[in-house]
Image: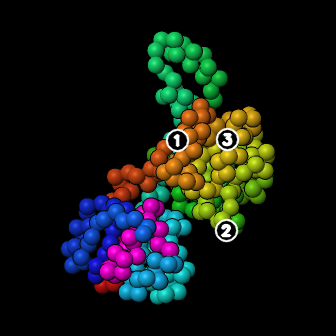
Amino acid sequence: MKILITDGMEESGVQALRALQHEVLLQKVSAEELPLLLSQHDGIIVRSATKVRKDTIDQCPNLRFIARGGVGMDNIDVDYARSKGIKVINTPAASSRSVAELAMAHLLGITRSLQLTNRELKDAESFASLKKKLSNSTEIESKNLLLIGCGRIGKELAKMAVACGMKVIVHDPFIQELKLQIHIAEHRINLDIPLVDLEQGLKQADYISLHAPFSGQAILSKNEFSLVKKNAFIINASRGENINETDLLLALNEGKIAGAALDVFSNEPNVLPELLAHPQIAVTPHVGASTIEAQERIAMELVDQIQHNFS
C-alpha cells in the first residue's frame, strides 16, 4: 500500500512499514493540499495536527485506512469514514503512562509554584522574595484528587496519586464501578475508587485533573469554577476545549481557584498570551505523549494494526 504520514512517526515504525513492502511518504501537508495528495495513497497516519474531515474523505475514494497515533480522534470524522468502509484505528494504550506522568508532574509542580520560580528567580533579591512568598506551600498527601474521566490515562494517574497518599475520587458517567490494583515494591494493593457526580466532586476536590474527550462543550466553565474550593488546582492534559479559558482566567484573577497546569489549549498553537504569562498557570506545549517510550510504542502498535488488518 501507499501510506502518507503527515505528522511524523518514529523511524523504527517507518522502517517496519517499508519492511512490509509498503510505500511510505513522510510529508507535512497543508489542509488545502491534503485532499489531492491523499487521493494518491491508500492510507494516512496522523497525530493531532492533521484533520481528516468529510470533504477530504469524499475526495479520496481509494482510501482504505486512517490511523491516529495517539488516543483522541476528534480531528477525524470517524463515523463518516467508517460508513464509507474506511478502517479507522488509533493507539489508546501506547501513551497512557507518559501522559499520566506529565499530569502528575504538573500536579506536583503547581503545588509548589515551580512555574513562578522558573520565571522569576534571577538574583539574590528575587531569591529572598520568592523564598518568603512560597513559604506557605502545601503537601499533596491526604488531599482529594478528582479525576474527570477515568480511562487508561486516568487509571495510571490514580495509581500514582494513591501511591503518594492522595485520596482519589472519580467522575465518569461511562463507568459504574472502579477497582484498581496498585503495585508498591513487592506489595499488591486492591482499591475501590469512589465515583461521584460532578457537582459533588468539584466541591470536594483539592485537585481536578481532566482525562475526558471533548464532547462539544467545555467541562469546566464559569458555573463549575464557582463550585470549587478557593485553594483547588486544575490540571488539563486532555483537550484544550474542555476548559473555557476565559472563565479560567477570570476564576484565577478573582481568587476562586489557586492555580492551573495546562498541557493543552483550545486554539493550539496560538495560545492566549494571558495563559502563558499568568503567574498561577504552569504550561507545556502539548507534550503529554512526547516521550521516547510512548512514541516507540505508538509507532509499533500502528504497524501491528496495519499489518493485522491489511496483510
Marking on residue 249: 3
Q: Is residue 257 magenta?
A: no
Residue at x 32%, y 79% (from the top left corner): 41
Position above or below: 211 against 42: above
The local crowd at label 2, few if under 14, some if 14 to 19, many if 20 or more residues have their Cα within 10 Å, is few
Mark 2 vs mark 1: which is more N-terminal? 2
- Residue type marked 2: Phe
Residue at x 44%, y 58% (from the top left corner): 95
**Closer to us: mark 3 or mark 2?**
3
Which quarter of the rendered picture does the N terminus lie within? bottom left
Q: Nearer the viewer, residue 269 or 128?
A: 269
Q: Is residue 143 visible?
A: no
* Callouts 2 and 1 close, C-beta under 8 Å: no
Q: Gap in Å between the C-alphas at discs 2 and 1? A: 29 Å
Residue at x 36%, y 77% (from the top left corner): 36
Residue at x 31%, y 65% (from the top left corner): 27
Marking on residue 283: 1
- Residue type marked 3: Leu
* Callouts 3 and 2 close, C-beta under 8 Å: no
Q: Is residue 95 visible?
A: yes
Seen in the image, is 59 located left or right of residue 239? left
Task: Report x, y in % for residue 54.
Answer: 52, 78
Which quarter of the rendered picture does the C terminus lie within? bottom left
- Residue type marked 1: Val
Mark 3 vs mark 1: which is more N-terminal? 3
Task: Report x, y in % for residue 108.
Answer: 55, 37
Q: Gap in Å between the C-alphas at discs 3 and 1? A: 14 Å
The magenta stretch is 33-53
Marking on residue 174: 2
The local crowd at label 3, few if under 14, some if 14 to 19, many if 20 or more residues have their Cα within 10 Å, is some
* Callouts 3 and 1 close, C-beta under 8 Å: no
